[in-house]
Amino acid sequence: MPRRSTRLDPYVDQYAERTSSMTVSAVRALFAVANRPEVVSLAGGMPNITDLPLGTIGDAFNDLVRSAGVQAMQYGSGQGELFMREKIVEVMAEEQIHANPDDVVVTCGSQQALDLVTRIFIDPGDVILCEAPSYVGALGTFNASQARIHHVAMDEHGLLPDALRTAVLALRAEGARVKFLYTIPNYNNPTGITQTLERRRALLDVAHEVDLLVVEDNPYGLLTFDGDPVPALRAMDDQVIYLGSFSKTFAPGFRIGWVLAPHAVRERLVIAQEAAVLSPPVFSQFAIAAYLDRFDWRGQIVAFRDMYRERRDAMLRGLEDHMPAGTTWTRPTGGFFVWVTLPEGLDSQALLARAVNERVAYVPGSAFYADGFGGRNLRASYCFPTAERIYEGTRRLGRVIAAELEM
Ligand code: PMP
């Protein structure tokens, strides 16, 4: 092969093939603009943690360093500390998941859980089934492993089980190796949609029928605003691989998430975890355990729910008041996101520059598809700005869409 090295990048011929599928996330480029103070950012997915009791948490961490600093600052177990895994089992019990701490692997956020699961299952060209649309960070991980991403249709009740069956059978008929379904059944990122109980049953039935592994990603499950939560897929079927996280129920900076997996899978995950990071951050595990032991974390989750519910309400009110005819949107019952569908003929990517000029930002829908769909959609998140700012953001967005319609 002729050398293509350039002065800008002399290593250009030496990178692994897989880097060709690692692209700069559209979202990253957007954040620089969206973070300007005059812009109402409905783009980011950052949790709002400003109401955490930082003073008393600080005191607890101080005690931690004095009493257990030597262990907390040492290397730890590749699987994660046993005390942490026991706490994680307690947290999962809130969602009716019954598990053994031995089947849990602690990870650097659920993002790393996605990476580990991908590493142990995916060879280049293997198929991963994802909802249409799906979490942009998962698509990035799957792309980096050279997986072939195949989207399965969903409606307002979640993934369509018949479409799942059809996709698996068709892909296998053409010789594809279909490895797993990746799904976010609660308050889906980016749509805010939650799978109904009937849908979950039907989906698990199809997974059994066609012998398909299910990977459930559930970082928002405890952030329910209205009514009773629907049981997790893992609560209904112990063969489901389950990903959890403290990022939305406590704070993301500790980078602690986990995988709960059937025993044989768990063993491979631990080996992959040791190869990746030796041990997940020990200090973070001590810190999170101290928080869970000493604080009313369930009460804190109730406070988070109340705050996000108010913001969700502000967004839905704002959309109702300001969206031009022909615009539709989802009505989430928990989580962080609303999925907006623009009037026919409009393109959310093309509209973004005008929106930023009008001081409002969102994530274009195409970021959440591996196949270029989503042009008429955008994700509007209500997690970070205040209710007043969110309402104002929808007003600005409404003006932008109306102006575009008049052109
Ligand atoms: N999965 C989903 C669906 C998410 O929305 C996020 C965070 N935005 C993650 C996984 C990763 O979260 P973390 O690594 O902080 O646990």
Image (cartoon, helix red, strand yellow):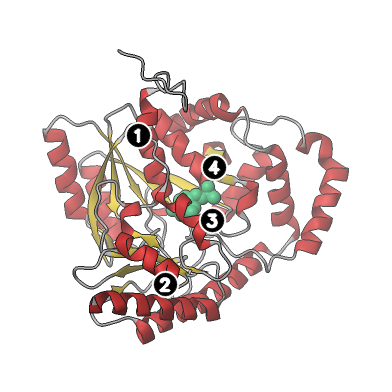
1 or 3: mark nearer the eye: 1
Q: Residue at x 52, y 67 (%)?
A: 383
Residues at circles 1 and 3 in contact by the CB criterion of under 8 Å: no
User: How many badges with numbers are in the image?
Assistant: 4
Asked if residue 193 can be seen in this view, the reply is: no
Give above or below for 85 relative to 345.
Answer: above
Seen in the image, is 195 located left or right of residue 248? Answer: left
Q: Residue at x 21, y 54 (%)?
A: 161
C-alpha span from label 4 to label 1: 37 Å
Seen in the image, is 41 located left or right of residue 58? Answer: left
Residue designated by label 3: 93
Instruction: Check residue 21 in the rendering and tell me which mark sits there, or answer none.
Output: 1
At which x and y percent is residue 91?
58, 55
Seen in the image, is 81 located left or right of residue 64? Answer: left
From the Cβ of disc 3, is ligand 1 less than 8 Å away? Answer: no
- Which amino acid lies under the numbered mark 4 shown in the image of this protein? Asn
Mark sitting earlier along the chain (4/2): 4
C-alpha span from label 1 to label 3: 38 Å
Mark sitting earlier along the chain (1/2): 1
Residue designated by label 4: 100
C-alpha span from label 3 to label 4: 11 Å
Instruction: Check residue 142 in the rendering and tell me which mark sits there, or answer none.
Output: none
* Residue 70 figure quarter: top right
* Quadrant containing the N terminus in the rendered view: top left
At which x and y percent is residue 57?
77, 59
Mark sitting earlier along the chain (4/1): 1
Residue designated by label 2: 333
- Which amino acid lies under the numbered mark 1 shown in the image of this protein? Ser
- Which amino acid lies under the numbered mark 3 shown in the image of this protein? Ala
Residues at circles 3 and 4 in contact by the CB criterion of under 8 Å: no
